[in-house]
Image: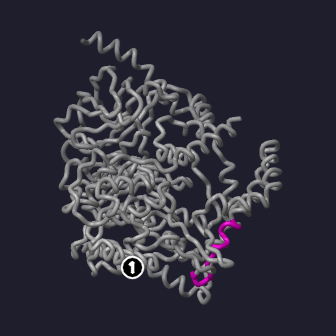
Amino acid sequence: MKRFICVIMCIALIICALPLCASAEDEAVSYNGYPVVLVPGYASASLCYEKDGKTKSAWGWKIDDILPGILSNLKYIIKSADDYISKNNTANLIETVGKCIVSLLEPMECNPDGSSKYDVRPVLFKAEETCDSYLNKVYPKGDYRVELDMTGAFDELVGEENVFYFNCDFRMSAVDCAMELDRYICDVKDYTKAEKVNIVAVSHGGLITATYLALFSDKTDVYNVVMDEPALGGAGLASDLMNGKIVFDEETFVKYLEYHAMCETDYNWLVRAHQLGFLDDAMEKIVPLARDSFIYWGSIWDFTPPDEYEKFKAAYLDPAESAELIEKSDFVHYEIMSDYKNIFASAKERGINVSIIAGSGNRIVTGQDNISDGIITLKSSTGAFTAPFGKRFSDSYISEAYENGRNISPSMDVDASDCYLPENTWIVNGLFHGMEFWDEYSRSLMFKLLLSENPPDVNSDPEYPMFHDTTSVTQSVYIQSENGGYILPGTNKLTVLNTSEKYNMHILNIKSKGIDLDFDYDFHTIRPGESREIEFSGNISEGITYSEITITYIAVGSVTPLNQRKQHFTAINGEPDKSAAEDEGKFTESGFITDFESRASSTTISFLDKIGLRDFANTLYDASETKINRLIKFIIK
C-alpha cells in the first residue's frame, strides 16, 4: 500500500509541476531597451520531420503521436500492469514501456557521424514566429514553448514584442547550436531593428551561449548575458546514461518535484520511509534499450563530464565512422570547457556583461555525492571548488582560505575564488535546477542582471550578495543575519521571514549549534510574506566558527504543520585559528548531532532510520521543548 501511495504522490507532484506563472508585478527594473532572447534548457524545442508527404512530430509529442503505440501494445501493457500489481513483477511492464519509448525515439536517431537520420528541424525557428507577441496570439495555450512563467514575466516587464524564444535541434553539438544562435540573433536584430539583444540562458542553453561567446563575441551583438544554472562543465546524468545504470535518490527527486510545484506540504518523508527502488529497476532496463536512439547525439557527448569523456569515447565511438562527431565534441571539451575564464573575460572586454546564477546544497537526483542543483554540479555550472555533499571544509582549509582572502560560503562547503566569473557569480543554497523563477531572490536578481543598463557584481549591491539561501515557498521560512549568512561582532538579531503564500507561521523553537546563542523570541503569528526580528545574546568565539541555526515552527493549516528548517552560518570574530591541524584533510562532516540524537539509544535511531522518521523525531523533540522554554523565559522575566 505504501508503494502505491508513493507512486500516486509522485504522479500528483509531476502534474502539479506543470508550468506555473510567477508574477512580475513587484519587480522594478530599469530596462536597457534591448530585446530578450531566451535560450532554454535541454529538449525544449519541438522538432518535426517529413515522412510520406506529411509533417510528423519527432519531439514534443502530442496524444496523437503517442496513442497508436499505446493501442498497438495495449494487451501487453494491461497484462504487465496486472503482473506488477498482483505479483510485484516489474520486468514485463518495464520492457513494454521501454519498447514504446524506443519506437517514439526512432525519428530522433542520428548517424555515427552525428548527422540526423531524418530531416529533423524545429517546428518554429524564425524571429517573427518565435516572438511572444506572435506565440501568445497564435498559440495562447503555450504550444511549442516551455519556461512560460519566465517569458510571461518578461512580457510584462519589457513588452511581448521584445521577447523571443530560441529553438534549435538540441541533439546537435553545442557548436552547431551556437551557429544557429548567431543566425537567430541576427534575425531578431533585423526584425526589431535593435542594435543588440539580451540573453537569458538556462541549463543546456548556458553551454550553447558560452560556445556562442567563444565563437562570435567579437560581433558584439549581445549586451547582457545571464546564465541560469548552466551546464558549462557537462552533466553527470550523461555518464549515468553511458553506463546504462541510473540509481535515483528518491527523496531528492521528490524534493525537486515539490520545489517545482511550489508545494508547501512536505511529502519527501514518505518516500524516505519507503524508497521507490522500482524506479531504479525501470531505468536500468529502459536506458540500454533506448541508448541506441541517442548514442550519436552530439549534445549527449558535450554533456559528458571531461573526466570521463575519453573513456566513453573509446567505448562507443569508432574513430573513422564518428570522426565528425568526435571533432566537434573534442572542440567543446578542449577548447570551450577548458577556457571559460578567458572566454568570459574576452566577452567582458568587448562590452558584454556576463553573469551566472547557480544552485547548490542539493544531492544530484541520481544519488551522486556532489553539491549541485539536483541535476548539474556546482563545479560544472560555476567552476567553484566544493566539498562533497554532506561535508564541509575542514578548519585547516578554512584557516588557509580566509588568510588568503578566498570567497567561502556561509555553509563552508563552497570556495568560489576559482569560479569562471568570481565577481559575477551568485550561488543560491537550496535552489533546484531550472527553478530560479520559483525563488524570489534569484528571480529578482535575474531581472536586475538581464535588463539593467549597468548590472551589479557581487560586491556592488548589498541586496544581492554572492551567497544566499533559497527563499522558495517550499521552505516556508528563511533566516538571515544583518550580514546575510555571516554573523559578525556586534550582530545581535536575526530576521525570520515567512516565505509561505498560504500559511501563518508560529515559531516554536530556535536553537544554535557551533556557537552558543540564546534567542529571545515570542510565539506571535508571522503572516505570509511578513518577517520578524529575533534578538539573541551569547558569545562568539574568536576566529572563524561554523554554526547551524534550526528553527522549529508550525505552518497553520498545512497538511504537515510541524516543520523545521536548518541554515548554516559562519561566525567571524577576528583572525582564523592558525593552530588547526595541518593533517586533518580538506573536508569534515557538515552536520551536528541533534539534542534528540544525543539522548536516544542507537537502537531507537536505527529503527527511526529504517522507517524514515528520524528527522520527524528530531522536529518533535525540539517542538516539545517549547513549553519548557516558555516557562523558563516567564520565570526569568
The answer to whether residue 62 is left or right of residue 127 is right
Tell me where residue 79 appears, x and y as whole percent: 83, 51
Q: Nearer the viewer, residue 538 or 493?
A: 493
Which residue is pictured at 38% across the width and 15% down the height? Answer: 628
Which residue is pictured at 55% across the width and 37% down the height? Answer: 267
Q: Nearer the viewer, residue 387 or 619?
A: 619
Give the structural element (helix, strand or loop) at label 1: helix
Q: How many marks?
A: 1
Residue range corresponding to the magenta coloring: 102-115
Q: Nearer the viewer, residue 282 or 481?
A: 282
Crowding at dot 1, Cα within 10 Å, few <14 / some 14-19 / many 20+, comes out as few
Residue receiving disc 1: 183
- Residue 522 visible at all: yes
- Residue 315 visible at all: no
Tell me where residue 550 appears, x and y as whole percent: 38, 33
Amino acid at the residue labelled 1 = Arg
Which residue is pictured at 34% across the width and 49% down the height? Answer: 412
Q: Nearer the viewer, residue 426 or 98?
A: 98
Tell me where residue 178 appears, x and y as whole percent: 41, 76
- Is the residue 276 above or below the residue 311 in the image? above
